[in-house]
């Protein structure tokens, strides 16, 4: 039995500068023979025995190995076999216990990329880059059924805000492959996006600009912008361009091999996700009361902000670049509420304080997760008179890899030793880069 852990861009996409990732980024694959004796370590009679890494503990990894038979509609015409391996990776990236924590940095980007590639690869048989509404409902349902049967969370449509309309052309006037290729400069598009620089694309936007240009040309097929009728038409045009951008993504997924397409799509989603803070800030009144101008008790202030940030941590894993946005957003919010002192510095708040540092799951799952990384990048206090420093600023330094202080993965009552911990932390931190 071949147990696929990860492939391609799962090794290095959206967790750019992330504090934690998921075990799915372990490279390669594990060949798991069903024979019981293969679970035992090989010990040479003349050599010191090597540590036994019990990777096959049955209960916590059951979602990965005990697949169920999905109930499919029988009405979807998409070629699921074209992305079979990728869907296996997606089911792990979106594994039931961790999907909500990994939603914005791993699960949803992988889910969306897989769906785009599924439609793109299927267009080789249909010559269509979109589905009609009825077919989209059946195919989205089948898509999720297959993932859930492999251990993925059964609420992915909700977690990732995925709807049947995501499989259609929306308001884009072009979905036929031939019409697409006669409308856009496909050779230039492929030259820009056939392979992207995962580090520099977010700043240089070579592929993103090419996609936007192609999407605009497709959108112009709907009407002549020279006869605009005001802001309403411009707003409609903006929506149309966004819908056409999805069509461009699917065409790229058609022209590239699945792994190459995934590299591009995950890289682009990485650029998009790192531009915004995914956290929701609850009411800050108790922080402003304890830390506002006239503060006379530093201990009380720090206790309050630490408690507030600890609640933010529980929402989601975030990348360091997202954490920068979150720190700036919260700082500006507090400053507008009359907190003028740099309480991040005063109370030693770091970027990792904005991200999940542990996940303790219920007993039935048998999984607990602890991630304590000591990179401790200080959270920058924003200035009302200056914009936050851009991550594209070459003088800005964020560690390429986190320094691991401690970390462990426990499988029920089983504690995996330092070797597995190192593997896990490598997987969880391997997506840091500058």
Image (cartoon, rainbow, N blue to C red):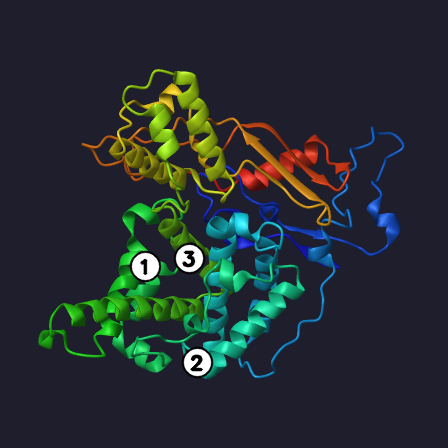
Residue, disc 1: 192
**CA distance for labels 2 and 3:** 27 Å
- In this rendering, would 398 be left or right of 111? left
Say few, some or many: other residues with alpha carbon within 10 Å of mark 2 (under 14 / 14 to 19 / 20 or more). Answer: some
**CA distance for labels 2 and 1:** 32 Å
Residue, disc 2: 133
Of tags 2 and 3, which is closer to the observer? 2
| Image position of 165 with respect to 361: above or below | below
Question: x, y (%) of residue 274?
Answer: 38, 46
Q: Earlier in the sequence, mark 3 or mark 1?
A: 1
Residue, disc 3: 264
Question: Which residue sits at x=35%, y=74%?
Answer: 170
Q: Quadrant of residue 342?
A: top left
Q: Nearer the viewer, residue 425 or 152?
A: 152
> Is disc 2 in contact with disc 3, using a CB cutoff of under 8 Å?
no
Question: x, y (%) of residue 225?
Answer: 14, 74
Q: Quadrant of residue 247?
A: bottom left
Q: Nearer the viewer, residue 340 or 377?
A: 340
Question: Which residue sits at x=28%, y=48%?
Answer: 204
| Image position of 316 with respect to 34: above or below | above
| Image position of 170 with respect to 158: above or below | below
Q: Quadrant of residue 190?
A: bottom left
| Image position of 326 with respect to 5: above or below | above
Question: x, y (%) of residue 398?
Answer: 40, 32
């Amino acid at each position: 039995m071949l147990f696929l852990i990860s492939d391609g861009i799962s090794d290095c996409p959206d967790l750019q500068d992330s504090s934690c990732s998921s075990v799915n980024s372990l490279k390669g694959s594990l060949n798991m023979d069903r024979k019981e004796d293969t679970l035992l370590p090989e010990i040479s009679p003349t050599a010191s025995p090597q540590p036994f890494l019990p990777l096959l503990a049955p209960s916590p990894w059951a979602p990965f190995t005990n697949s169920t038979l999905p109930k499919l509609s029988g009405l979807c015409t998409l070629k699921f076999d074209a992305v079979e391996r990728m869907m296996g990776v997606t089911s792990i990236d979106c594994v039931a216990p961790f999907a909500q924590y990994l939603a914005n940095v791993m699960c949803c980007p992988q889910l969306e990329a897989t769906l785009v590639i599924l439609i793109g690869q299927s267009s080789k048989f249909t010559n269509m880059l979109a589905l009609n509404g009825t077919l989209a409902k059946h195919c989205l349902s089948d898509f999720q059924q297959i993932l859930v049967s492999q251990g993925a969370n059964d609420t992915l449509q909700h977690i990732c805000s995925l709807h049947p309309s995501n499989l259609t052309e929306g308001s884009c006037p072009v979905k036929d492959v031939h019409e697409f290729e006669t409308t856009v400069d496909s050779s230039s598009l492929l030259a820009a996006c056939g392979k992207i620089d995962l580090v520099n694309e977010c700043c240089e936007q070579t592929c993103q600009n090419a996609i936007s240009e192609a999407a605009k040309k497709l959108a112009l097929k709907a009407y002549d912008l020279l006869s605009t009728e005001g802001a309403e038409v411009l707003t409609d045009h903006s929506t149309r361009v966004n819908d056409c951008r999805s069509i461009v993504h699917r065409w790229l997924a058609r022209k590239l091999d699945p792994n190459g397409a995934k590299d591009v799509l995950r890289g682009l989603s990485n650029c998009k996700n790192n531009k915004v803070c995914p956290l929701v800030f609850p009411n800050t009144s108790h922080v402003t009361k304890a830390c506002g101008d006239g503060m006379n008790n530093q201990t009380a202030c720090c206790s309050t902000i630490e408690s507030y940030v600890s609640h933010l941590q529980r929402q989601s894993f975030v990348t360091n670049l997202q954490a920068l946005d979150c720190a700036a957003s919260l700082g500006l919010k507090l400053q507008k509420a009359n907190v003028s002192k740099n309480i991040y510095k005063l109370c030693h708040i770091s970027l990792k304080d904005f991200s999940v540092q542990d996940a303790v799951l219920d007993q039935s799952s048998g999984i607990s997760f602890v991630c304590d990384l000591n990179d401790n990048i200080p959270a920058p206090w924003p200035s009302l008179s200056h914009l936050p420093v851009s991550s594209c600023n070459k003088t800005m330094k964020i560690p390429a890899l986190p320094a691991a202080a401690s970390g462990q993965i426990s499988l029920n009552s089983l504690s995996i030793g330092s070797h597995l911990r190192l593997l896990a932390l490598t997987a969880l931190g391997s997506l840091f880069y500058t």
